[in-house]
Image (cartoon, coloured by chain):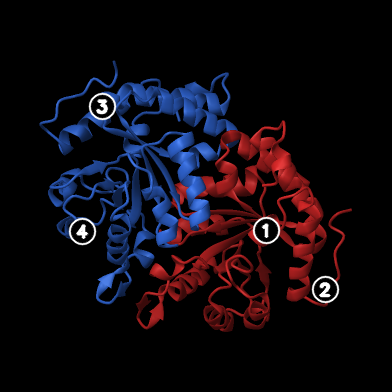
Chain colours: A red, B blue
């Protein structure tokens, strides 16, 4: 983070200033803001208070995503869902599939809210288990197919986390699920290519996420405008015809 | 929770009283306390402050487990590990495997701390993916084998979450990993049998966890002593020869 923000300020205060400035500067170019819970939780209770402040700074009508990757038995999952959807008021939560149906469905029971299930992740370790083949299909395909069944007749919106680093998986799953929203991390610092992502998946709804490339565009006093530039560049690549929205006003 | 605790008190205050009383009453019969993060997080920042207070109430020398089931890319995982091990000071964290090696190893890099990786979980959804067979072995076996490789040459202690509801899996994995600590939930309310668990897995280190059966033994003013009775009964079944320790003093 830019060092000048820490001069005379506590770490939570510096993080609050940084994040609200990023939101203010980049919102004309964005559809959604994804909050990485790990970074707020690392600051303890004060970090979560900062997260609330930053959430309040997100302009009305923009989407918010709690990138929390929770996954626990049904009873615990209900509490996590309540926390993110009701207490913090996020629109979306990311959820992990390893514990199966009862760990995911409590999130899908919320109308007007969405769940992005980890299906094919962009990190190196994503290859460790997600590509294991069973009955001729990789694990991530089993996860996607089961999740579509779980979401049937449930009011919440189901989406998949599909890393930008496996274009083949993106395209293959888009063919099977033409209408499922994909949250696509891995563009930018992780090596995914925005144009390839669009070709592979943008026939259906996609949210392309870039974190580090925008957040850390500059560590100087110009971090805000520089982040806006990066966001603007990515937006142009993803949707050349979409006008800049006035999220800032 | 016992309704009398809420009379004139805020929910976080009632939860604090409940949990510290449970710790005080059951610690003579326990080796460890497992904190379910979902329930504390559901109370927002104040819930996490309550969790710190309850952690302080755990007698010196007893183990504490953050049942958080985190699983995120390496960079985020480092922040989660720092939060649970350094900020809150837990001895163990539960971690989810879906995102693979780089989501787990940051926890294993802590000396004198332990990571319980979800391998075979006791909930109904645990059957959805964990039993999928690849190369002749179920997914949970792949997870266990990979994790043993990741932990090699790392200073942290690796353990597995192995539900009491699949005795066959418990016994089979104990044969392959004679020295790996197993955290075993699912005894009691979830239907697992304590004696069967001991026969299947107690040739190696095991921590058997019972939550609801102890916590909710009574919803009256006697909830503390009744929880102690349940804990004592379970302890006697698990290790008939172990004396009651004086964790209460």
Q: Quadrant of the N terminus of chain B?
A: top left
**Residue B24 x/y as whole percent:** 34, 21
Q: CA distance from mark 2 to mark 1?
A: 25 Å
Q: Nearer the viewer, residue A20 or B55?
A: A20
Q: Which residue is mark 2?
A: A242
Label 4 with label 3: CB-CB less than 8 Å? no
Note whether B38 is above or below A118 in the view shown. Answer: above
**Numbered circles on residues, count:** 4
Q: Which residue is mark 1?
A: A112
Instruction: Classify 10 Å Cα crowding around label 3: few (below 14), some (14-19), many (20 and above).
Output: some
Label 4 with label 1: CB-CB less than 8 Å? no
**Residue B44 x/y as whole percent:** 59, 37
Do the residues at pointers 2 and 1 share their chain? yes
- Badge 3 marks a residue whose secondary structure is helix
Q: CA distance from mark 4 to mark 2?
A: 54 Å
Q: Nearer the viewer, residue B148 or B65?
A: B148
Q: Quadrant of the C terminus of chain B?
A: top left
Q: Which circle marks residue B229 in the picture?
A: 3
Q: Which residue is mark 4?
A: B173
Label 2 with label 3: CB-CB less than 8 Å? no
Q: Which circle marks residue B12 in the picture?
A: none
Q: CA distance from mark 2 to mark 3?
A: 65 Å
């Amino acid at each position: 983070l830019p060092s000048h923000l820490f001069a005379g300020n506590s770490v939570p205060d510096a993080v609050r200033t940084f994040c609200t400035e990023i939101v203010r500067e980049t919102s004309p170019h964005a559809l959604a803001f994804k909050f990485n819970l790990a970074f707020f939780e690392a600051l303890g209770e004060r970090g979560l208070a900062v997260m609330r402040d930053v959430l309040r700074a997100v302009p009305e009508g923009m989407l918010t995503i709690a990138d929390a990757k929770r996954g626990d038995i049904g009873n615990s999952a209900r509490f996590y869902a309540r926390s993110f959807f009701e207490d913090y008021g996020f629109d979306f939560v990311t959820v992990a599939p390893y514990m199966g149906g009862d760990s995911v469905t409590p999130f899908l029971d919320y109308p007007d809210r969405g769940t992005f299930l980890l299906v094919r992740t962009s990190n190196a370790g994503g290859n460790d288990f997600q590509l294991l083949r069973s009955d001729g299909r990789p694990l991530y395909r089993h996860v996607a197919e089961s999740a579509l069944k779980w979401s049937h007749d449930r009011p919440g919106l189901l989406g998949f986390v599909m890393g930008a680093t496996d274009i083949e998986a993106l395209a293959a799953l888009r063919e099977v699920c033409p209408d499922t929203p994909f949250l696509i991390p891995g563009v930018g610092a992780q090596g995914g290519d925005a144009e390839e992502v669009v070709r592979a998946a943008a026939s259906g709804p996609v949210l392309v996420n870039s974190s580090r490339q925008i957040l850390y565009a500059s560590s100087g006093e110009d971090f805000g405008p520089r982040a806006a530039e990066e966001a603007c560049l990515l937006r142009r690549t993803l949707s050349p015809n979409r006008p800049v929205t006035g999220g800032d006003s």
